[in-house]
Image: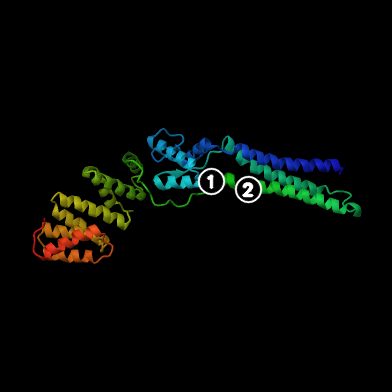
Amino acid sequence: MPERARNAVFVLGAAATISLTAALVALSPGQTDRVAAIGAQIKCPVCEGESIADSPADMARDMMGLVEERVAAGLSDQEIIDELLASYSGALHLDPPARGAALVLRLIPVLALAAGTGVIAWWRRHPDPVAAAAATEEANAGRGRRRTLIGGLILAAGAVIAAGAFAAGDDPPAAAPQDVSEVSNQTLEAVIAENLDDPRVNGMRLALAERYVEAGDHRSAFPHYLAVAKSPGAAPEEAVAALTSLGQMAWESDETSTALGLADEALRIQPGSIAALLLKAKALWCGEGDGEAAAALLEQALGDGGLDPEARAVAEADLDAVRSGEGCE
């Protein structure tokens, strides 16, 4: 094969590698494109088959705002996706749409692999006719190494690009515990309404109900506590939290027998529940006048090292009052 033809093949191989690199640089998404691309991979929790990038829903806009903030903060795409999936129950990971620049990026690895393989195969089928000559053996070996290096670079570039282009299609890791501290009540209500049969919203229900109780809105808190208490998929600690909260609401409404029944159910699920022990002690002492039984429950609760200082002080004061024969205040 003439030297000029071999040099042309060498130049074409180098040009292919440079072109692939340039294409990657040219197609690297800017900040705005990244926000849209990430949004297109997340299903809106309150929409019918729409991504948050395409949905006009308020929740979708909130989620896109979060994406924009995290992109500006320098988080990776996967970190942002993981946070969205952990914070918004019902959000699902969609395959990124293969169109426009994304489609080109997915085609580049295929072309790169084909080009690299073709160049190496062509060189193997067209050996240099003077390669065996002693006078030119070393020079030909150097050219062969250069050719193999170029083909290898093309193959490696294709493999790296392929890994990056298709990584977004991998299944995301398991969702982390939900943090809803910065999510509005309206958004939580919408997520819960769209995922009524999903036990993963029980944590959201409890957090939302607690907000309502702190605001004095027991009417809005009640259905969420009740739903968690009845949920077959509720974790024991979730069920106990819901039952004791309902029992406290019943006690405050002078429904002593209901409060006692709810406390007993909570203790059946979790015999050492401090909240249930304190609730039952209060109901027995103040509602049934059974100070002896109340004292035993208070002693059991005080024997638990997990009792926080404020609750411990209240329980100790109640125990002293019960022992001294004082009435319930």
Q: In this view, does 24 lie to the left or right of 228?
A: right
Name the image colouring. Answer: rainbow
Q: Is mark 1 on a helix, strand or loop?
A: helix
Q: Distance between the residues labelled 1 and 2?
A: 15 Å
- Residue on which disc 2 sits: 160
Q: Is residue 265 visible in the rendered structure shown here?
A: no
| Type of amino acid under label 2 | Val
Q: Quadrant of residue 234?
A: bottom left
| CA neighbours of label 1 inside 10 A, class few (<14), some (14 to 19), many (20+) | few
Foreground label between 1 and 2: 2
Give how far across and how far down residue 40 sits, in percent: 49, 38
**Quadrant in the picture for the C terminus:** bottom left
| CA neighbours of label 2 inside 10 A, class few (<14), some (14 to 19), many (20+) | few
Q: Which of 208 and 260 is in front in this view?
A: 208
Q: Quadrant of residue 9?
A: top right
- Residue on which disc 1 sits: 169
Give how far across and how far down residue 181 sits, in percent: 35, 46
The residue at the point 59 percent across, 39 percent down is 28
Q: What element carries label 2?
A: helix
The residue at the point 31 percent across, 48 percent down is 207
**Between discs 1 and 2, the one toward the N terminus:** 2
Q: Is residue 112 visible in the rendered structure shown here?
A: yes
Q: Which of 32 and 120 is in front in this view?
A: 32
Give how far across and how far down residue 167 sits, in percent: 55, 47
Task: Look at the numbered discs 1 and 2 and tell me whether their residues touch, using CB distance below 8 Å.
Answer: no
The vertical placement of 288 against 17, above or below, is below
Give how far across and how far down residue 72 sits, in percent: 48, 40
The vertical placement of 87 against 36, above or below, is below
